[in-house]
Image (tube, grey):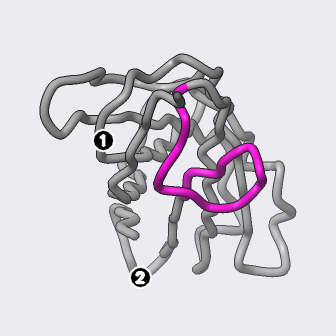
């Protein structure tokens, strides 16, 4: 998905996210009574990738299609850039955002996962966005 950097000649990246159900499989239909997680993978490459410091911040949001919950789900997960060795390139990362059972009401939602970069605690011009999929949450009988 989209990964934006200030200078594509010195840094590039990729970012993706999926919703994982309790059975550990990607899912788009989930019981409201089940916990789930959003699994994000990203990588950075290019001359600047090996000298980066700072932190990544990964958060997930749901937007209702019709009535329903809208907002952040689960906590923001912080991943130090140093969590992946500087070499060899690309530097690969992952994070899981755990969401408790009952956190989302029944309905159809669009999942959006956001990756932000900070250095020294200050935001930078590097970000990634993973939009979709549509997810149906339902109340079991």
User: Front-most of 129 and 32?
Assistant: 32
The residue that mark 2 highlights is: 9
**The one of 49 and 128 positioned closer to us in this rendering:** 128
Q: Which mark sits nearer the N-terminus, 2 or 1?
A: 2
Q: Does the magenta stretch include residue 82?
A: no
Q: Give the range drawn in magenta.
A: 18-32
Q: Which picture quadrant has residue 134?
A: bottom left
* Of 73 and 13, the residue lying toward us: 73
In the rendered image, residue 67, in percent from the top left (x then y), is placed at 16, 25
The residue located at (61%, 77%) in the rendering is 45
The structure residue drawn at horizontal position 40% and vertical position 65%, both measured from the top left corner, is 3
Element class at badge 1? strand
Going by the image, does 112 lie left or right of 10? left
Q: What element carries label 2?
A: loop
Q: Residues within 10 Å of mark 2 (few under 14, many from 20)?
A: few
User: Which residue is label 1 attached to?
Assistant: 109
């Amino acid at each position: 998905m989209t990964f934006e950097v200030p200078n594509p000649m010195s840094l590039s990246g990729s970012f993706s996210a999926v919703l994982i159900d309790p059975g550990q499989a990607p899912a788009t239909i989930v019981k409201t009574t089940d916990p789930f997680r959003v699994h994000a993978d990203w990588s950075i490459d290019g001359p600047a990738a090996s000298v980066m410091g700072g932190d990544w911040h990964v958060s997930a949001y749901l937007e209702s299609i019709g009535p329903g919950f809208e907002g952040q789900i689960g906590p923001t997960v912080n991943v130090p850039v140093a969590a992946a060795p500087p070499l060899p390139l690309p530097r690969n990362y992952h994070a899981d955002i755990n969401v408790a059972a009952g956190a989302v009401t029944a309905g159809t939602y669009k999942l959006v996962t956001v990756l932000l970069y900070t250095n020294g605690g200050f935001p930078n011009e590097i970000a990634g966005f993973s939009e979709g999929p549509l997810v149906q949450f339902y109340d079991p009988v």
